[in-house]
Amino acid sequence: MSIKSLLLVFDGYNHDLPALNQALSLTQHSRSHLRVVHFAEPPILPETLGLGLYAGAIADGPVIDLLEATSRELTDTARAHTGSQCVHHGVPLLSDGEPGVMGQAAATFRVVVGTAADALAREALVTDLVILSWDNQPHGNFAGVLTALFGADQPVLLLPRHSAVTGYADGFARTVVFGWDGSRASAQALREAVPHMLHADEVFLLRIAPQRQDADLVSEEDLLAYLHSHSVSADFVRAERGTRTIGQALLEEAQRLGADLLAMGAYGHGHLSEMILGGVTDHVLKHGSLPLLLAH
């Protein structure tokens, strides 16, 4: 298993530069291809705001011109940041669509007119990993995260804007903690996490108990044997939930184990039900500060 095609969603703002740098570091060390995608969202038309008779006047006035100029400026900034950071990391920046040299790191920059909600699923069809910056605050905007998780069928690497983990020296985490819950979805997420585990110094499979009534579909021995077959040495760790929620226990135990990457299945019970019931994924997104590898 290897990661050879990456997609980074890059808005161009300074707070997303760490994600760009991390993506390029991963690209360089894995000798992969990185596609930096910038979504240039068109201005919101006045008629969609319910302005009625005033819509035409505003549409013909300076407001739309200003919005379009701001969008172009942000696109130019994103392109400039991508170019300068490619030089810094020694990763060639190719023209969009140029294949590059097989087995060597390379990057391209693509502007997509439209919203990520409309176009990300299409852009992610032929990639191994989607990367995006994540505003990990209790009231942060998770629209981009949800779009990536449900719009793309690929695993998503979320890099928090507010975190003690500032990046990985060789592009990969040193200590990976995988949140195992015994489900079929968790087994799928485990397979997606193997390429990251291969480069780690330590790997822990963390089981919070008790978590659910039904027994695990896969035994601890079979899990470790599967990882061993992929040259991954891991330890199985059980932690009591106690009075904590599963999400709280998962974050606390991952930090106790020294994780710099937490991997897990996401929204195993569906996004709507987890929002209503306060699911594990929602808690981790709102309260976590570790980079996350999520698979839905």
Image (cartoon, rainbow, N blue to C red):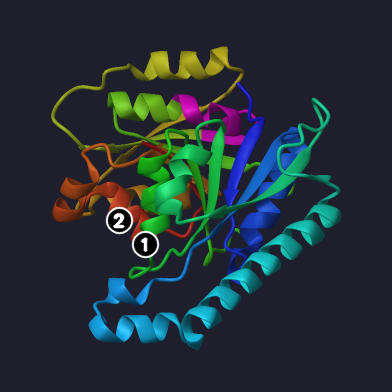
Confirm whether residue 249 shows in the render: yes
Residue pictured at 17% horizontal, 34% vertical: 212
The local secondary structure at tag 1 comes to: helix
Quick one: quadrant of the C terminus? top left
Residue pictured at 46% horizontal, 19% vertical: 224
> Residue 50, percent across and down?
24, 77
Q: Is residue 267 above or below residue 222?
A: below
> Residue 254, percent across and down?
44, 48
Image quadrant in which you'd find residue 264 = top left
Badge 1 density bin: few <14, some 14–19, many ≥20, Cα 10 Å? some
**170 and 113: which is toward the camera:** 113
Badge 2 density bin: few <14, some 14–19, many ≥20, Cα 10 Å? some
Quick one: quadrant of the N terminus? top right
Confirm whether residue 200 shows in the render: no
Residues at discs 1 and 2 in contact (Cβ within 8 Å): yes
Q: Which residues are magenta?
A: 191-203
**186 and 104: which is toward the camera:** 104
Dot 1 amino acid type: His
For disc 1, the marked residue is 287
Q: Is residue 217 above or below residue 287?
A: above
Residue pictured at 37% horizontal, 20% vertical: 220
